[in-house]
């Protein structure tokens, strides 16, 4: 049966990253996806990066990551992947990506998810990924691009962005054409109305490029990042598509809004609910 993982940021907001790793393990996950978004302090309204003193941003970040890895090992779980900060078009954020790849290796992760620039072509985004690949090769880490979305004020739906449909995603994969460059399919993004695709179509199209996932649910209108099986996505079809295409990576949740309903005292309950949803999906894939 496929192993399960979840992002760390939502739990870390409630109990701190160190305790979050412990609770993620005790909730039943096999692994964790380190969210490195806190490496920067980005103001979305002003499109400005401010100085940040998070441990990820410090010169001794590697030592901090080693301490997190040790906690995970003590509780029997590993880091399967990480998520670099975004938006990619911000120069200060773009400048963190080599460090993110290096920290991924320190954590023991095998994949670092780095968003493409929403507004650039496959060839333009490939230039950025080409610059990062030597670091990825040296660290033994794969870079994963992710399917993105923009927003249309006219239609009030999601609209095209880099990798948002099979054609664009495959163009990105082929423009780089390196074994250390893979696809991270965000199930929720793929199901947003206005993008004219689906998670199943993306899975079937990406084939062996697909090596990691961001799993969450939504109403197909907003990017709600809800717990799987709580809204409108047909996970039975998703499970069959993953099985049909021989997906053998981790099932990594990115249901970041689920833990917003909980506090530090009840965080474990929320994580247990998340783990149970991931186990359910793993069983569905096993039985498909």
Image: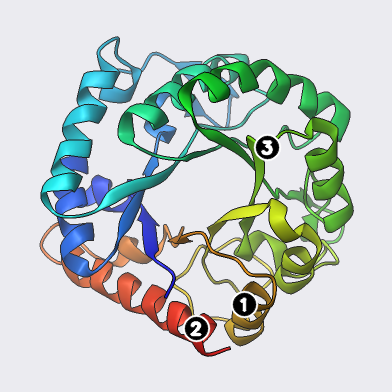
Q: Quadrant of the C terminus?
A: bottom right
Please tell me whether mark 3 sits on a helix, a strand or a loop: loop
The residue at the point 34 percent across, 71 percent down is 274
Residue 286 is marked as: 2
Asked if one can make out residue 15 in the rendered structure from this viewpoint, the answer is no
User: Residue at position x 80%, y 48% from top?
Assistant: 169
Closer to the chain start, of discs 2 and 3, is 3
Density class for disc 3 (Cα within 10 Å; few <14, some 14-19, many ≥20) is few
Residue in view at x 39 percent, y 66 percent: 3
Is residue 82 depicted above or below 106 in this figure?
Answer: below
Question: SS for tag 2?
Answer: helix
Between the residue at mark 2 and the residue at mark 3, the CA separation in whole angstroms equals 27 Å
Task: Determine whether 236 is above or below 137 in the image.
Answer: below
Q: Which residue is mark 1?
A: 243
203 sits to left or right of 195: left
**Would you name the residue on which mark 3 appears?**
179
**Distance from label 3 to label 1 (Cα)?**
22 Å
Of 209 and 52, the residue lying toward us: 209
Q: Nearer the viewer, residue 236 or 120?
A: 236
**Residue found 18% across the figure and 55% down from its top:** 76
The image quarter in which residue 248 lies: bottom right
Q: How is the image coloured?
A: rainbow
């Amino acid at each position: 049966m496929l192993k399960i993982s979840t992002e760390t940021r939502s739990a870390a907001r409630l109990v701190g990253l160190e305790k979050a790793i412990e609770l993620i393990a005790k909730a039943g996950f096999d692994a964790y996806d380190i969210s490195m978004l806190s490496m920067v302090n980005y103001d979305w309204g002003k499109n400005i990066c401010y100085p940040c003193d998070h441990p990820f941003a410090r010169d001794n970040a590697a030592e901090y990551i080693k301490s997190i890895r040790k906690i995970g090992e003590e509780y029997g779980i590993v880091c399967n992947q990480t998520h670099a900060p975004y938006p990619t078009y911000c120069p200060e954020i773009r400048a963190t990506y080599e460090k993110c790849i290096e920290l991924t290796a320190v954590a023991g992760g095998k994949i670092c998810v780095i968003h493409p620039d929403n507004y650039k072509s496959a060839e333009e985004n490939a230039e950025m990924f080409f610059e990062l690949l030597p670091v990825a090769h040296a660290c033994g880490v794969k870079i994963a691009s992710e399917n993105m979305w923009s927003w249309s004020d006219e239609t009030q739906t999601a609209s095209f962005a880099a990798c948002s449909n099979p054609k664009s995603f495959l163009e990105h994969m082929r423009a780089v054409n390196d074994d250390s460059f893979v696809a991270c399919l965000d199930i929720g993004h793929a199901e947003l109305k206005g993008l004219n695709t689906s998670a199943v179509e993306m899975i079937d199209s990406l084939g062996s490029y697909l090596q990691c996932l961001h799993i969450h649910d939504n109403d197909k209108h907003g990017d709600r990042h809800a717990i799987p099986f709580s809204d409108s996505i047909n996970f039975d079809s998703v499970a069959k598509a993953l099985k049909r295409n021989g997906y053998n990576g981790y099932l990594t949740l990115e249901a970041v809004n689920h833990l917003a309903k909980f506090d530090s005292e009840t965080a474990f309950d929320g994580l247990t609910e998340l783990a149970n949803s991931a186990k359910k999906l793993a069983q569905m894939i096993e039985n498909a």
